[in-house]
Image: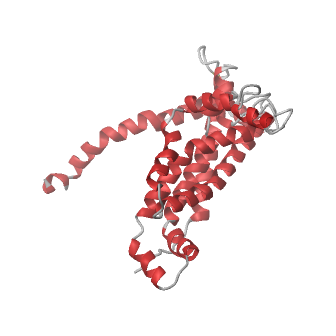
Amino acid sequence: MEKVMSNKLVIALYVLPSLLLLFAVIYVPIVLTGYYGLNQWNGIGPMTFVGLDNYQHLFTDAAFWQSAWHSLLLALFSGISLIGYLVVAMILSGKIKGANLLRKIYLIPMLLSSVAIAQLWLKMYHPTNGVLNSLLASVGVHNPPEWLANPSLVLLALFIPIIWQYAGFYILIYYAGLKNIPETLMEAARIDGASAWQIATRIKLPLLREVINVTIILSIVGSLKYFDLIYVMTDGGPNGASEVMASYMYHQAFRSFDFGYGSATAFALLLICLVATWVIRKVTATSDTIQYS
């Protein structure tokens, strides 16, 4: 077997099918999207080559930049929420009563589809029969807000279920990382008189740094291209107040039937995500390797 696997031709034959599949479903569509962005096209008829016109228009399109600002706000909100997820994971990783049940409760939103979560929170935010406004009315608030119809509140109202949706996912990642830290390190620190705060900040956080870096990238890039729950709950409304880059791209391609401009928007979204990933990796990169022995 070793002789066979040392043959480069055999290795290439094993790798080639997955490599071809990867090119077919990921890289070829990316190149085609960039190309479609160079054309005027309604998605059905013949394409008209317009060069960089769609991309130039994107730079001066105020609606696109407004959607980009909303996506950036969601990314910041998601990034900050990682702190809360990490704190919860640290608590759950300790020897507390009911930790196993709490972990399962936090995982429930991750098991639901985005559409189901959107329908649930639509009921919560309903202006007359919603749970939230009923609670506000019960404590004497006479004019509770219309959460999804108020342009100044709709983004916050959408961010909360998105954060809730992914809480279990990130808590699970942090929990797995914390459980991989040898218990002997914490016991040695306790014997030396270290407090719980010192153990968390000087042992757990440094050893969890690589995991934290990965979650920052997942959280921010995932937020920049987020689409489904916002589409179901508000469809970018009211009047574009909750439009994000992915929903703006969808509206251009499938509502305005301007597939050329929609493709240019999608390609720009890809570039923004790549730049964000590169910046985060540069900011969080370090050559130091932490080892405790």
Q: Which residue is found at the position 40% from the left and 72% from the top?
A: 183
Residue 60 found in image quarter = top right
Instruction: Please determine whether, in this image, residue 240 is positioned above or below residue 201.
Output: above
Query: Which residue is the extreme one toward the right?
Result: 142
Q: Which residue is found at the position 59% from the left and 62% from the top?
A: 282
Front residue (pair 220, 255): 220
Instruction: Please determine whether, in this image, residue 37 is positioned above or below residue 293.
Output: above
Residue 74 found in image quarter = top right
Q: Is residue 249 visible?
A: no
Measuring from the top left, give residue 210's x and y in whole percent. Answer: 50, 63
Measuring from the top left, give residue 158's x and y in whole percent. Answer: 69, 37
Measuring from the top left, give residue 39's x and y in whole percent. Answer: 64, 26
Front residue (pair 221, 5): 221
Query: Which residue is the extreme one toward the top?
Result: 45
Q: Which residue is found at the position 81% from the left and 34% from the top?
A: 145
Q: How is the image coloured?
A: secondary structure
Measuring from the top left, give residue 154's x and y in whole percent. Answer: 76, 36
